[in-house]
Image (cartoon, rainbow, N blue to C red):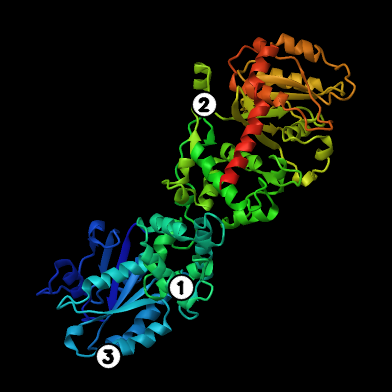
Amino acid sequence: MRKDVRILLVGEPRVGKTSLIMSLVSEEFPDEVPPRAEEITIPADVTPERVPTHIVDYSEAEQTDEQLYQEISKANVICIVYAVNNTNSIEKVTSQWIPLINDRTDKDSRVPLILVGNKSDLVEHSSMETILPIMNQYTEIETCVECSAKNLKNISELFYYAQKAVLHPTGPLYCPEEKEMKPACIKALTRIFKITDQDNDGILNDAELNFFQRACFNTPLAPQALEDVKNVVRKNVSDGVFDNGLTLKGFLFLHTLFIQRGRHETTWTVLRRFGYGDDLELTQDYLFPLLKIPPDCTTELNHNAYLFLQRVFDKHDLDRDCGLSPDELKDLFKVFPYMPWGPDVHNTVCTNDGGWITYQGYLSQWTLTTYLDVQRCLEYMGYLGYSIISEQESQAAAVTVTRDKKIDLQKKQTQRNVFRCNVIGMKGCGKSAFLQAFLGRNLMRQRQIREDHKSFYAISTTYVYGQEKYLLLHELSTDSEFLSDSEISCDVVCLVYDSSNPSSFEFCARIFKQHFMDSKTPCMIVAAKSDLHEVKQDCSPSPSDFCRKHKMPPPQPFTCNTVDVPSKDIYIKLTTMAMYPHVMQADLKSSTFWLRASVGATMFAVLGFAMYRALLKQR
Protein backbone atom coordinates (compact mmCIF):
# COMPACT_ATOMS: atom_id res chain seq x y z
CA MET A 1 0.00 0.00 0.00
CA ARG A 2 1.14 3.56 -0.72
CA LYS A 3 2.80 5.51 2.07
CA ASP A 4 0.84 8.68 1.22
CA VAL A 5 -1.81 10.05 -1.16
CA ARG A 6 -1.62 13.24 -3.23
CA ILE A 7 -4.99 14.70 -4.35
CA LEU A 8 -5.13 17.48 -6.96
CA LEU A 9 -8.28 19.61 -7.50
CA VAL A 10 -8.73 21.15 -10.96
CA GLY A 11 -11.64 22.79 -12.79
CA GLU A 12 -12.91 26.05 -14.15
CA PRO A 13 -12.52 29.27 -12.16
CA ARG A 14 -15.15 29.94 -9.47
CA VAL A 15 -16.53 26.37 -9.29
CA GLY A 16 -15.51 26.16 -5.61
CA LYS A 17 -12.23 24.17 -5.55
CA THR A 18 -10.65 26.31 -2.84
CA SER A 19 -13.89 26.46 -0.82
CA LEU A 20 -14.06 22.65 -0.76
CA ILE A 21 -10.56 22.40 0.71
CA MET A 22 -11.16 25.14 3.29
CA SER A 23 -14.53 23.66 4.33
CA LEU A 24 -12.87 20.29 4.88
CA VAL A 25 -10.10 21.76 7.04
CA SER A 26 -12.12 24.23 9.11
CA GLU A 27 -15.42 22.28 9.05
CA GLU A 28 -17.25 25.50 8.17
CA PHE A 29 -17.75 27.55 5.04
CA PRO A 30 -15.14 30.33 4.84
CA ASP A 31 -16.25 33.97 4.92
CA GLU A 32 -13.38 34.94 2.65
CA VAL A 33 -11.92 32.64 -0.01
CA PRO A 34 -8.36 33.24 -1.27
CA PRO A 35 -7.55 32.79 -4.99
CA ARG A 36 -5.81 29.51 -4.13
CA ALA A 37 -5.41 27.37 -1.00
CA GLU A 38 -1.95 26.40 0.17
CA GLU A 39 -1.10 22.69 -0.02
CA ILE A 40 -2.32 20.98 3.14
CA THR A 41 -1.37 17.64 4.65
CA ILE A 42 -3.88 15.62 6.64
CA PRO A 43 -2.08 13.35 9.17
CA ALA A 44 -2.52 9.59 8.93
CA ASP A 45 -4.30 9.26 12.28
CA VAL A 46 -7.28 11.37 11.16
CA THR A 47 -7.84 9.72 7.77
CA PRO A 48 -10.05 6.61 7.38
CA GLU A 49 -7.29 4.63 5.67
CA ARG A 50 -4.54 5.74 8.11
CA VAL A 51 -2.42 7.22 5.31
CA PRO A 52 -1.08 10.83 5.18
CA THR A 53 -2.99 12.76 2.53
CA HIS A 54 -1.77 15.86 0.66
CA ILE A 55 -4.45 18.08 -0.93
CA VAL A 56 -3.34 20.47 -3.68
CA ASP A 57 -5.39 23.32 -5.13
CA TYR A 58 -5.06 24.74 -8.66
CA SER A 59 -5.76 28.29 -9.70
CA GLU A 60 -5.63 29.43 -13.31
CA ALA A 61 -5.00 33.00 -12.14
CA GLU A 62 -2.16 32.07 -9.78
CA GLN A 63 -0.36 29.31 -11.72
CA THR A 64 1.13 28.77 -15.17
CA ASP A 65 0.33 25.90 -17.52
CA GLU A 66 3.74 24.39 -16.78
CA GLN A 67 3.00 24.38 -13.04
CA LEU A 68 -0.33 22.68 -13.75
CA TYR A 69 1.40 19.98 -15.82
CA GLN A 70 3.89 19.35 -13.00
CA GLU A 71 1.07 18.98 -10.47
CA ILE A 72 -0.77 16.55 -12.76
CA SER A 73 2.36 14.39 -13.06
CA LYS A 74 2.77 14.31 -9.24
CA ALA A 75 -0.88 13.59 -8.41
CA ASN A 76 -2.13 10.14 -7.38
CA VAL A 77 -5.76 11.11 -8.01
CA ILE A 78 -7.33 14.16 -9.65
CA CYS A 79 -10.70 15.66 -8.70
CA ILE A 80 -12.29 17.55 -11.62
CA VAL A 81 -14.62 20.04 -9.96
CA TYR A 82 -17.62 21.52 -11.75
CA ALA A 83 -20.56 23.59 -10.51
CA VAL A 84 -23.89 21.77 -10.82
CA ASN A 85 -25.57 25.10 -11.68
CA ASN A 86 -23.05 25.92 -14.42
CA THR A 87 -23.52 24.02 -17.68
CA ASN A 88 -20.29 25.41 -19.16
CA SER A 89 -18.20 23.99 -16.29
CA ILE A 90 -19.77 20.55 -16.92
CA GLU A 91 -19.00 20.73 -20.65
CA LYS A 92 -15.38 21.64 -19.88
CA VAL A 93 -14.96 18.30 -18.04
CA THR A 94 -14.89 16.44 -21.39
CA SER A 95 -13.79 19.20 -23.76
CA GLN A 96 -10.80 20.37 -21.73
CA TRP A 97 -9.91 18.67 -18.47
CA ILE A 98 -10.05 14.94 -19.23
CA PRO A 99 -8.12 15.30 -22.56
CA LEU A 100 -5.55 17.58 -20.90
CA ILE A 101 -4.97 15.12 -18.03
CA ASN A 102 -4.80 12.10 -20.35
CA ASP A 103 -2.27 13.86 -22.58
CA ARG A 104 -0.04 14.36 -19.54
CA THR A 105 -0.26 10.81 -18.14
CA ASP A 106 0.85 7.41 -19.41
CA LYS A 107 -1.88 5.49 -21.24
CA ASP A 108 -1.10 2.23 -19.41
CA SER A 109 -1.19 3.82 -15.96
CA ARG A 110 -3.84 6.51 -16.11
CA VAL A 111 -4.35 8.51 -12.94
CA PRO A 112 -7.82 7.86 -11.43
CA LEU A 113 -10.35 10.70 -11.75
CA ILE A 114 -13.17 11.79 -9.44
CA LEU A 115 -15.90 14.06 -10.82
CA VAL A 116 -17.03 16.53 -8.16
CA GLY A 117 -20.30 18.43 -8.60
CA ASN A 118 -20.09 21.36 -6.16
CA LYS A 119 -22.79 23.90 -5.17
CA SER A 120 -25.53 21.30 -4.90
CA ASP A 121 -27.20 23.64 -2.39
CA LEU A 122 -28.06 26.04 -5.24
CA VAL A 123 -30.20 23.63 -7.30
CA GLU A 124 -33.12 21.31 -6.73
CA HIS A 125 -32.08 18.79 -9.40
CA SER A 126 -29.09 16.42 -9.74
CA SER A 127 -26.45 16.58 -12.45
CA MET A 128 -26.04 12.79 -12.50
CA GLU A 129 -28.18 12.35 -15.62
CA THR A 130 -25.63 14.43 -17.53
CA ILE A 131 -22.60 12.92 -15.81
CA LEU A 132 -23.42 9.19 -16.15
CA PRO A 133 -22.73 9.04 -19.93
CA ILE A 134 -19.36 10.72 -19.28
CA MET A 135 -18.52 8.11 -16.63
CA ASN A 136 -19.43 5.32 -19.05
CA GLN A 137 -17.24 6.86 -21.75
CA TYR A 138 -14.09 7.27 -19.63
CA THR A 139 -13.03 4.19 -17.62
CA GLU A 140 -10.47 6.20 -15.62
CA ILE A 141 -13.35 7.95 -13.81
CA GLU A 142 -13.75 6.14 -10.50
CA THR A 143 -16.91 7.85 -9.26
CA CYS A 144 -18.89 11.09 -9.12
CA VAL A 145 -19.77 12.95 -5.91
CA GLU A 146 -22.24 15.81 -5.64
CA CYS A 147 -21.47 18.08 -2.69
CA SER A 148 -21.76 21.54 -1.21
CA ALA A 149 -18.85 23.44 0.31
CA LYS A 150 -21.38 25.88 1.82
CA ASN A 151 -23.42 23.42 3.90
CA LEU A 152 -20.59 20.81 4.15
CA LYS A 153 -22.61 18.13 2.34
CA ASN A 154 -20.46 15.14 1.25
CA ILE A 155 -17.17 17.01 1.80
CA SER A 156 -15.55 14.29 3.90
CA GLU A 157 -16.96 11.65 1.54
CA LEU A 158 -15.41 13.40 -1.45
CA PHE A 159 -11.89 13.16 -0.04
CA TYR A 160 -12.50 9.63 1.26
CA TYR A 161 -13.45 8.49 -2.27
CA ALA A 162 -10.40 10.25 -3.67
CA GLN A 163 -8.16 8.49 -1.15
CA LYS A 164 -9.91 5.19 -1.84
CA ALA A 165 -9.37 5.57 -5.60
CA VAL A 166 -5.62 5.60 -4.97
CA LEU A 167 -5.36 2.99 -2.22
CA HIS A 168 -8.01 0.63 -3.59
CA PRO A 169 -8.09 1.31 -7.35
CA THR A 170 -10.67 -0.43 -9.50
CA GLY A 171 -8.52 -0.41 -12.65
CA PRO A 172 -6.17 -3.33 -11.87
CA LEU A 173 -9.07 -5.49 -10.64
CA TYR A 174 -12.00 -5.05 -12.96
CA CYS A 175 -12.92 -4.35 -16.58
CA PRO A 176 -16.21 -2.36 -16.60
CA GLU A 177 -16.77 -2.90 -20.35
CA GLU A 178 -16.64 -6.68 -19.96
CA LYS A 179 -18.17 -6.57 -16.46
CA GLU A 180 -15.66 -9.10 -15.18
CA MET A 181 -12.42 -9.28 -13.23
CA LYS A 182 -9.15 -8.87 -15.11
CA PRO A 183 -6.90 -11.94 -15.68
CA ALA A 184 -4.18 -10.73 -13.27
CA CYS A 185 -6.76 -10.37 -10.48
CA ILE A 186 -8.20 -13.83 -11.19
CA LYS A 187 -4.69 -15.32 -11.15
CA ALA A 188 -3.86 -13.70 -7.79
CA LEU A 189 -7.16 -14.75 -6.18
CA THR A 190 -6.75 -18.29 -7.51
CA ARG A 191 -3.38 -18.55 -5.77
CA ILE A 192 -4.98 -17.23 -2.56
CA PHE A 193 -7.76 -19.83 -2.85
CA LYS A 194 -5.25 -22.67 -3.31
CA ILE A 195 -3.20 -21.56 -0.28
CA THR A 196 -6.34 -21.28 1.86
CA ASP A 197 -7.62 -24.70 0.70
CA GLN A 198 -5.40 -26.46 3.21
CA ASP A 199 -6.73 -29.98 2.57
CA ASN A 200 -6.52 -29.52 -1.22
CA ASP A 201 -10.04 -30.81 -1.86
CA GLY A 202 -10.99 -27.93 -4.18
CA ILE A 203 -13.44 -26.28 -1.76
CA LEU A 204 -13.15 -23.97 1.25
CA ASN A 205 -14.97 -25.55 4.19
CA ASP A 206 -16.19 -23.55 7.18
CA ALA A 207 -12.92 -23.94 9.10
CA GLU A 208 -10.87 -22.79 6.10
CA LEU A 209 -13.21 -19.84 5.44
CA ASN A 210 -12.96 -18.77 9.07
CA PHE A 211 -9.16 -19.05 9.00
CA PHE A 212 -9.15 -16.93 5.82
CA GLN A 213 -11.45 -14.37 7.47
CA ARG A 214 -9.25 -14.11 10.57
CA ALA A 215 -6.06 -13.87 8.51
CA CYS A 216 -7.39 -11.02 6.38
CA PHE A 217 -9.80 -9.17 8.66
CA ASN A 218 -8.78 -10.28 12.19
CA THR A 219 -12.24 -11.59 12.99
CA PRO A 220 -14.10 -14.87 12.29
CA LEU A 221 -17.48 -15.08 10.59
CA ALA A 222 -20.47 -16.07 12.68
CA PRO A 223 -22.10 -19.36 11.58
CA GLN A 224 -25.16 -17.52 10.22
CA ALA A 225 -22.97 -15.05 8.32
CA LEU A 226 -21.14 -17.99 6.70
CA GLU A 227 -24.44 -19.49 5.60
CA ASP A 228 -25.62 -16.12 4.26
CA VAL A 229 -22.47 -15.81 2.15
CA LYS A 230 -22.92 -19.31 0.73
CA ASN A 231 -26.62 -18.65 0.02
CA VAL A 232 -25.72 -15.54 -1.99
CA VAL A 233 -23.31 -17.65 -4.05
CA ARG A 234 -25.85 -20.48 -4.46
CA LYS A 235 -28.44 -18.05 -5.88
CA ASN A 236 -26.04 -16.63 -8.46
CA VAL A 237 -23.61 -19.42 -9.42
CA SER A 238 -24.79 -22.97 -10.07
CA ASP A 239 -21.52 -24.64 -9.00
CA GLY A 240 -20.28 -21.97 -6.59
CA VAL A 241 -20.98 -24.16 -3.56
CA PHE A 242 -20.23 -27.88 -3.39
CA ASP A 243 -20.55 -30.20 -0.40
CA ASN A 244 -21.39 -27.10 1.70
CA GLY A 245 -18.01 -25.54 0.81
CA LEU A 246 -17.09 -22.60 -1.41
CA THR A 247 -15.56 -23.55 -4.78
CA LEU A 248 -13.01 -21.46 -6.66
CA LYS A 249 -15.81 -20.29 -8.96
CA GLY A 250 -17.84 -19.18 -5.95
CA PHE A 251 -14.82 -17.48 -4.36
CA LEU A 252 -14.15 -15.49 -7.54
CA PHE A 253 -17.84 -14.59 -7.86
CA LEU A 254 -17.86 -13.11 -4.34
CA HIS A 255 -14.95 -10.82 -5.16
CA THR A 256 -16.55 -9.78 -8.44
CA LEU A 257 -19.64 -8.88 -6.42
CA PHE A 258 -17.60 -6.85 -3.91
CA ILE A 259 -16.02 -4.85 -6.74
CA GLN A 260 -19.30 -4.29 -8.59
CA ARG A 261 -20.88 -2.97 -5.38
CA GLY A 262 -18.03 -0.53 -4.78
CA ARG A 263 -16.45 -2.57 -1.98
CA HIS A 264 -13.17 -3.19 -3.77
CA GLU A 265 -11.30 -2.31 -0.57
CA THR A 266 -12.40 -5.78 0.63
CA THR A 267 -10.64 -7.46 -2.30
CA TRP A 268 -7.60 -5.21 -1.90
CA THR A 269 -7.35 -6.11 1.81
CA VAL A 270 -7.23 -9.79 0.84
CA LEU A 271 -4.70 -9.22 -1.96
CA ARG A 272 -2.38 -7.15 0.22
CA ARG A 273 -2.56 -9.63 3.09
CA PHE A 274 -1.29 -12.28 0.69
CA GLY A 275 1.60 -10.09 -0.48
CA TYR A 276 0.29 -8.30 -3.60
CA GLY A 277 1.06 -4.73 -4.59
CA ASP A 278 -0.92 -2.28 -6.73
CA ASP A 279 0.34 -4.00 -9.90
CA LEU A 280 -1.01 -7.36 -8.64
CA GLU A 281 2.50 -8.76 -8.42
CA LEU A 282 3.92 -10.06 -5.15
CA THR A 283 5.94 -7.25 -3.62
CA GLN A 284 9.66 -7.40 -2.96
CA ASP A 285 9.05 -6.63 0.72
CA TYR A 286 6.77 -9.66 0.96
CA LEU A 287 9.01 -12.09 -0.95
CA PHE A 288 12.33 -10.93 0.53
CA PRO A 289 11.89 -9.85 4.17
CA LEU A 290 14.98 -8.54 5.91
CA LEU A 291 17.24 -11.26 7.27
CA LYS A 292 20.70 -10.42 8.58
CA ILE A 293 23.34 -13.13 8.22
CA PRO A 294 26.72 -12.36 9.87
CA PRO A 295 29.94 -13.79 8.35
CA ASP A 296 30.77 -17.45 9.11
CA CYS A 297 27.13 -18.19 9.92
CA THR A 298 24.83 -20.50 7.98
CA THR A 299 21.06 -20.64 7.46
CA GLU A 300 18.75 -23.53 8.30
CA LEU A 301 15.02 -24.12 8.50
CA ASN A 302 13.64 -24.30 12.02
CA HIS A 303 11.18 -26.79 13.50
CA ASN A 304 8.07 -24.74 12.64
CA ALA A 305 9.21 -24.42 9.03
CA TYR A 306 9.64 -28.19 8.71
CA LEU A 307 6.15 -28.72 10.19
CA PHE A 308 4.73 -26.30 7.62
CA LEU A 309 6.54 -28.03 4.76
CA GLN A 310 5.35 -31.39 6.04
CA ARG A 311 1.75 -30.12 5.89
CA VAL A 312 2.33 -28.87 2.33
CA PHE A 313 3.72 -32.28 1.34
CA ASP A 314 0.82 -34.09 3.00
CA LYS A 315 -1.65 -31.75 1.26
CA HIS A 316 -0.35 -32.75 -2.19
CA ASP A 317 0.60 -36.41 -1.57
CA LEU A 318 -2.91 -37.46 -2.56
CA ASP A 319 -2.20 -41.20 -2.82
CA ARG A 320 -0.35 -41.24 0.53
CA ASP A 321 2.65 -43.14 -0.87
CA CYS A 322 5.20 -40.76 0.74
CA GLY A 323 6.36 -39.65 -2.72
CA LEU A 324 5.38 -36.81 -5.06
CA SER A 325 4.42 -37.92 -8.56
CA PRO A 326 5.06 -35.47 -11.42
CA ASP A 327 1.39 -34.39 -11.32
CA GLU A 328 1.43 -33.97 -7.53
CA LEU A 329 4.64 -31.92 -7.74
CA LYS A 330 3.15 -29.77 -10.50
CA ASP A 331 0.04 -29.18 -8.38
CA LEU A 332 2.19 -28.19 -5.38
CA PHE A 333 3.96 -25.52 -7.43
CA LYS A 334 0.81 -24.03 -9.01
CA VAL A 335 1.04 -21.18 -6.50
CA PHE A 336 4.47 -20.28 -7.97
CA PRO A 337 4.89 -18.06 -11.06
CA TYR A 338 7.33 -20.64 -12.46
CA MET A 339 8.50 -24.20 -11.83
CA PRO A 340 11.28 -23.81 -9.24
CA TRP A 341 12.75 -27.33 -9.37
CA GLY A 342 14.41 -28.61 -12.51
CA PRO A 343 15.14 -32.25 -13.49
CA ASP A 344 18.51 -32.11 -11.64
CA VAL A 345 16.60 -32.12 -8.32
CA HIS A 346 15.82 -35.81 -8.84
CA ASN A 347 19.58 -36.46 -8.77
CA THR A 348 20.17 -34.19 -5.78
CA VAL A 349 17.83 -35.84 -3.29
CA CYS A 350 16.40 -39.27 -2.55
CA THR A 351 13.71 -40.64 -4.86
CA ASN A 352 11.65 -43.83 -4.83
CA ASP A 353 11.96 -46.65 -7.36
CA GLY A 354 9.75 -44.72 -9.77
CA GLY A 355 12.06 -41.70 -9.63
CA TRP A 356 9.59 -39.62 -7.62
CA ILE A 357 10.84 -37.33 -4.86
CA THR A 358 10.27 -38.93 -1.46
CA TYR A 359 9.19 -37.12 1.69
CA GLN A 360 12.81 -37.21 2.90
CA GLY A 361 14.04 -35.98 -0.48
CA TYR A 362 11.49 -33.16 -0.47
CA LEU A 363 12.65 -31.87 2.94
CA SER A 364 16.28 -32.30 1.86
CA GLN A 365 15.79 -30.06 -1.19
CA TRP A 366 14.26 -27.33 0.99
CA THR A 367 17.19 -27.71 3.40
CA LEU A 368 19.64 -27.38 0.50
CA THR A 369 17.96 -24.22 -0.83
CA THR A 370 17.94 -22.64 2.62
CA TYR A 371 21.63 -23.38 3.13
CA LEU A 372 22.90 -22.33 -0.32
CA ASP A 373 20.51 -19.49 -1.21
CA VAL A 374 18.39 -18.31 1.70
CA GLN A 375 16.88 -15.44 -0.32
CA ARG A 376 15.47 -17.95 -2.77
CA CYS A 377 14.12 -19.99 0.14
CA LEU A 378 12.34 -16.89 1.49
CA GLU A 379 10.89 -16.26 -1.97
CA TYR A 380 9.64 -19.85 -2.28
CA MET A 381 8.14 -19.86 1.22
CA GLY A 382 6.42 -16.59 0.30
CA TYR A 383 4.78 -18.22 -2.72
CA LEU A 384 3.50 -21.01 -0.44
CA GLY A 385 2.00 -18.45 1.97
CA TYR A 386 4.13 -19.42 4.98
CA SER A 387 3.54 -16.20 6.92
CA ILE A 388 -0.26 -16.46 6.50
CA ILE A 389 -0.69 -20.18 7.22
CA SER A 390 1.84 -20.19 10.09
CA GLU A 391 0.59 -16.83 11.39
CA GLN A 392 4.05 -15.29 11.39
CA GLU A 393 5.14 -11.74 10.56
CA SER A 394 7.10 -12.96 7.53
CA GLN A 395 8.80 -16.09 6.20
CA ALA A 396 12.04 -14.89 7.82
CA ALA A 397 10.56 -16.51 10.94
CA ALA A 398 11.12 -19.89 9.23
CA VAL A 399 14.90 -19.47 9.16
CA THR A 400 17.48 -19.99 11.90
CA VAL A 401 20.79 -18.21 11.50
CA THR A 402 23.45 -20.36 13.17
CA ARG A 403 26.16 -18.92 15.35
CA ASP A 404 29.68 -18.24 14.11
CA LYS A 405 31.62 -21.44 13.40
CA LYS A 406 34.56 -20.08 15.41
CA ILE A 407 32.35 -20.08 18.52
CA ASP A 408 31.42 -23.71 17.84
CA LEU A 409 35.10 -24.59 17.74
CA GLN A 410 35.81 -22.70 20.97
CA LYS A 411 32.91 -24.34 22.81
CA LYS A 412 33.61 -27.73 21.16
CA GLN A 413 29.93 -28.22 20.36
CA THR A 414 27.43 -27.14 17.74
CA GLN A 415 23.68 -26.70 17.41
CA ARG A 416 23.87 -26.79 13.63
CA ASN A 417 21.96 -29.44 11.72
CA VAL A 418 23.36 -29.02 8.19
CA PHE A 419 26.99 -29.75 7.34
CA ARG A 420 28.71 -29.14 4.04
CA CYS A 421 31.26 -31.54 2.59
CA ASN A 422 33.23 -30.50 -0.49
CA VAL A 423 34.13 -33.51 -2.63
CA ILE A 424 37.39 -32.97 -4.53
CA GLY A 425 39.34 -35.19 -6.92
CA MET A 426 40.67 -35.35 -10.44
CA LYS A 427 38.29 -35.97 -13.32
CA GLY A 428 37.07 -39.56 -13.59
CA CYS A 429 38.02 -40.55 -10.05
CA GLY A 430 34.39 -41.30 -9.02
CA LYS A 431 33.18 -38.10 -7.37
CA SER A 432 29.76 -38.15 -9.05
CA ALA A 433 29.29 -41.80 -8.15
CA PHE A 434 30.19 -40.96 -4.55
CA LEU A 435 27.42 -38.33 -4.47
CA GLN A 436 24.80 -40.60 -6.01
CA ALA A 437 25.68 -43.50 -3.70
CA PHE A 438 24.81 -41.22 -0.78
CA LEU A 439 21.26 -41.11 -2.20
CA GLY A 440 21.11 -44.92 -2.18
CA ARG A 441 21.90 -45.49 -5.87
CA ASN A 442 24.27 -48.22 -6.95
CA LEU A 443 26.28 -48.08 -10.18
CA MET A 444 23.53 -49.72 -12.21
CA ARG A 445 20.97 -47.05 -11.22
CA GLN A 446 23.50 -44.28 -11.78
CA ARG A 447 24.02 -45.32 -15.39
CA GLN A 448 20.41 -44.35 -16.09
CA ILE A 449 21.05 -40.68 -15.22
CA ARG A 450 21.07 -38.34 -18.21
CA GLU A 451 24.11 -36.11 -18.52
CA ASP A 452 21.97 -32.95 -18.79
CA HIS A 453 20.15 -33.92 -15.57
CA LYS A 454 23.34 -34.30 -13.55
CA SER A 455 23.68 -32.46 -10.24
CA PHE A 456 26.81 -31.31 -8.46
CA TYR A 457 25.01 -31.54 -5.11
CA ALA A 458 23.60 -34.41 -3.08
CA ILE A 459 21.87 -34.01 0.27
CA SER A 460 20.32 -36.47 2.67
CA THR A 461 20.24 -37.29 6.36
CA THR A 462 22.62 -39.29 8.49
CA TYR A 463 22.40 -40.19 12.16
CA VAL A 464 25.25 -39.45 14.55
CA TYR A 465 24.81 -40.44 18.19
CA GLY A 466 21.09 -40.78 17.45
CA GLN A 467 20.84 -37.23 16.13
CA GLU A 468 19.47 -36.66 12.64
CA LYS A 469 21.75 -34.34 10.66
CA TYR A 470 21.83 -33.23 7.04
CA LEU A 471 25.01 -33.85 5.06
CA LEU A 472 25.35 -31.74 1.95
CA LEU A 473 27.88 -33.07 -0.57
CA HIS A 474 29.21 -30.64 -3.16
CA GLU A 475 31.26 -31.96 -6.05
CA LEU A 476 33.89 -29.47 -7.20
CA SER A 477 34.24 -29.94 -10.94
CA THR A 478 37.79 -28.64 -11.29
CA ASP A 479 41.11 -30.17 -12.20
CA SER A 480 42.94 -27.08 -11.00
CA GLU A 481 44.76 -27.28 -7.68
CA PHE A 482 44.00 -23.59 -7.06
CA LEU A 483 40.64 -23.30 -5.33
CA SER A 484 38.66 -20.16 -4.56
CA ASP A 485 37.66 -19.16 -1.03
CA SER A 486 34.10 -20.38 -1.65
CA GLU A 487 35.41 -23.77 -2.83
CA ILE A 488 37.51 -24.11 0.32
CA SER A 489 34.73 -23.04 2.70
CA CYS A 490 33.04 -26.13 4.15
CA ASP A 491 32.77 -28.25 7.32
CA VAL A 492 34.64 -31.30 6.07
CA VAL A 493 36.63 -32.16 2.94
CA CYS A 494 36.43 -35.44 1.07
CA LEU A 495 39.47 -36.03 -1.18
CA VAL A 496 38.62 -38.79 -3.65
CA TYR A 497 41.10 -40.76 -5.72
CA ASP A 498 40.68 -43.72 -8.06
CA SER A 499 42.47 -46.66 -6.42
CA SER A 500 42.78 -48.34 -9.85
CA ASN A 501 44.53 -45.33 -11.44
CA PRO A 502 48.22 -44.92 -10.43
CA SER A 503 48.24 -41.14 -11.09
CA SER A 504 45.01 -40.29 -9.26
CA PHE A 505 46.18 -39.75 -5.66
CA GLU A 506 48.82 -37.14 -6.50
CA PHE A 507 46.11 -34.53 -7.23
CA CYS A 508 44.54 -35.10 -3.79
CA ALA A 509 47.94 -34.76 -2.08
CA ARG A 510 48.62 -31.46 -3.84
CA ILE A 511 45.16 -30.07 -2.98
CA PHE A 512 45.62 -31.03 0.68
CA LYS A 513 49.04 -29.40 0.95
CA GLN A 514 47.94 -26.28 -0.91
CA HIS A 515 44.71 -25.58 0.98
CA PHE A 516 43.99 -27.82 3.98
CA MET A 517 47.25 -28.87 5.63
CA ASP A 518 47.26 -25.86 7.95
CA SER A 519 43.51 -25.31 8.19
CA LYS A 520 41.14 -26.51 10.90
CA THR A 521 38.85 -28.18 8.37
CA PRO A 522 38.89 -31.96 8.87
CA CYS A 523 39.77 -34.05 5.79
CA MET A 524 39.08 -37.61 4.73
CA ILE A 525 40.79 -39.55 1.92
CA VAL A 526 38.48 -41.88 -0.02
CA ALA A 527 39.86 -44.70 -2.17
CA ALA A 528 37.12 -45.00 -4.79
CA LYS A 529 36.43 -47.97 -7.09
CA SER A 530 37.67 -50.36 -4.42
CA ASP A 531 35.94 -53.23 -6.23
CA LEU A 532 38.62 -52.96 -8.94
CA HIS A 533 42.23 -54.11 -8.67
CA GLU A 534 44.15 -51.65 -6.48
CA VAL A 535 47.38 -50.33 -8.01
CA LYS A 536 50.39 -48.65 -6.48
CA GLN A 537 50.17 -44.88 -6.72
CA ASP A 538 52.97 -43.10 -8.61
CA CYS A 539 53.48 -40.42 -5.97
CA SER A 540 55.26 -40.88 -2.69
CA PRO A 541 54.38 -41.38 0.13
CA SER A 542 51.56 -43.87 -0.39
CA PRO A 543 48.02 -42.86 0.55
CA SER A 544 48.23 -44.77 3.84
CA ASP A 545 51.59 -43.23 4.77
CA PHE A 546 50.35 -39.81 3.70
CA CYS A 547 47.36 -40.08 6.06
CA ARG A 548 49.58 -41.33 8.88
CA LYS A 549 52.05 -38.48 8.35
CA HIS A 550 49.31 -35.84 8.51
CA LYS A 551 47.41 -37.49 11.38
CA MET A 552 44.36 -38.27 9.24
CA PRO A 553 42.14 -41.37 9.29
CA PRO A 554 43.42 -44.05 6.89
CA PRO A 555 42.04 -44.01 3.32
CA GLN A 556 38.44 -45.20 3.30
CA PRO A 557 37.67 -47.83 0.63
CA PHE A 558 34.52 -47.08 -1.34
CA THR A 559 32.54 -48.70 -4.14
CA CYS A 560 29.01 -48.30 -5.43
CA ASN A 561 29.30 -51.29 -7.77
CA THR A 562 27.05 -53.32 -5.52
CA VAL A 563 23.86 -55.33 -5.91
CA ASP A 564 22.21 -53.67 -2.93
CA VAL A 565 22.06 -50.04 -1.81
CA PRO A 566 25.61 -48.75 -1.11
CA SER A 567 26.63 -48.52 2.54
CA LYS A 568 26.14 -45.21 4.35
CA ASP A 569 28.96 -45.76 6.85
CA ILE A 570 31.40 -43.48 5.09
CA TYR A 571 28.86 -40.64 5.07
CA ILE A 572 28.21 -41.06 8.80
CA LYS A 573 31.98 -40.72 9.32
CA LEU A 574 32.06 -37.51 7.28
CA THR A 575 29.13 -36.06 9.23
CA THR A 576 30.81 -36.99 12.51
CA MET A 577 34.05 -35.28 11.46
CA ALA A 578 32.04 -32.17 10.50
CA MET A 579 30.22 -32.16 13.84
CA TYR A 580 33.38 -32.71 15.90
CA PRO A 581 36.20 -30.89 14.07
CA HIS A 582 37.97 -30.34 17.42
CA VAL A 583 38.43 -34.10 17.98
CA MET A 584 42.07 -35.06 17.44
CA GLN A 585 42.61 -36.75 14.11
CA ALA A 586 44.30 -39.63 15.91
CA ASP A 587 41.06 -40.31 17.78
CA LEU A 588 39.23 -40.58 14.47
CA LYS A 589 41.24 -43.69 13.67
CA SER A 590 39.67 -45.50 16.60
CA SER A 591 37.03 -47.99 15.54
CA THR A 592 35.18 -47.47 18.84
CA PHE A 593 34.72 -43.77 18.00
CA TRP A 594 33.02 -44.62 14.70
CA LEU A 595 31.00 -47.37 16.38
CA ARG A 596 29.65 -44.96 18.99
CA ALA A 597 28.85 -42.36 16.34
CA SER A 598 26.91 -44.72 14.09
CA VAL A 599 25.02 -46.69 16.75
CA GLY A 600 21.33 -46.61 16.01
CA ALA A 601 21.64 -44.91 12.60
CA THR A 602 19.55 -47.54 10.82
CA MET A 603 17.08 -47.72 13.66
CA PHE A 604 16.50 -43.94 13.62
CA ALA A 605 16.14 -43.85 9.84
CA VAL A 606 13.49 -46.57 9.92
CA LEU A 607 11.79 -44.97 12.92
CA GLY A 608 11.60 -41.57 11.17
CA PHE A 609 9.90 -43.09 8.12
CA ALA A 610 7.54 -45.13 10.31
CA MET A 611 6.56 -42.02 12.28
CA TYR A 612 5.62 -40.18 9.08
CA ARG A 613 3.54 -43.17 7.98
CA ALA A 614 1.78 -43.11 11.36
CA LEU A 615 1.06 -39.39 11.04
CA LEU A 616 -0.53 -39.96 7.64
CA LYS A 617 -2.74 -42.71 9.04
CA GLN A 618 -3.89 -40.44 11.88
CA ARG A 619 -4.95 -37.83 9.35
Disc 3 versus disc 1: nearer the observer: 1
The residue located at (38%, 87%) in the rendering is 133
Structural crowding at the residue carrying mark 3, measured as other residues with C-alpha within 10 Å and reported as few (<14), some (14–19) or many (≥20): few
Percent of width and height locating residue 201: 57, 59
Reading the image, the residue beneath label 3 is: 87
Dot 2 amino acid type: Gln
Dot 3 amino acid type: Thr
Disc 1 versus disc 2: nearer the observer: 1
141 left or right of 578 in image: left
* Residue at the extreme left: 31
Q: Quadrant of residue 129?
A: bottom left
Q: How many marks?
A: 3
**Dot label at residue 233:** 1
Q: Secondary structure at mark 1?
A: helix
121 up-or-down from 26: above or below: below
User: Decide: marks 3, 1 in contact (CB < 8 A)?
Assistant: no
Reading the image, the residue beneath label 2 is: 415
272 left or right of 579 in image: left
The residue located at (40%, 55%) in the rendering is 215
Q: Secondary structure at mark 3?
A: helix
* Residue at the extreme right: 533
Q: Secondary structure at mark 2?
A: loop
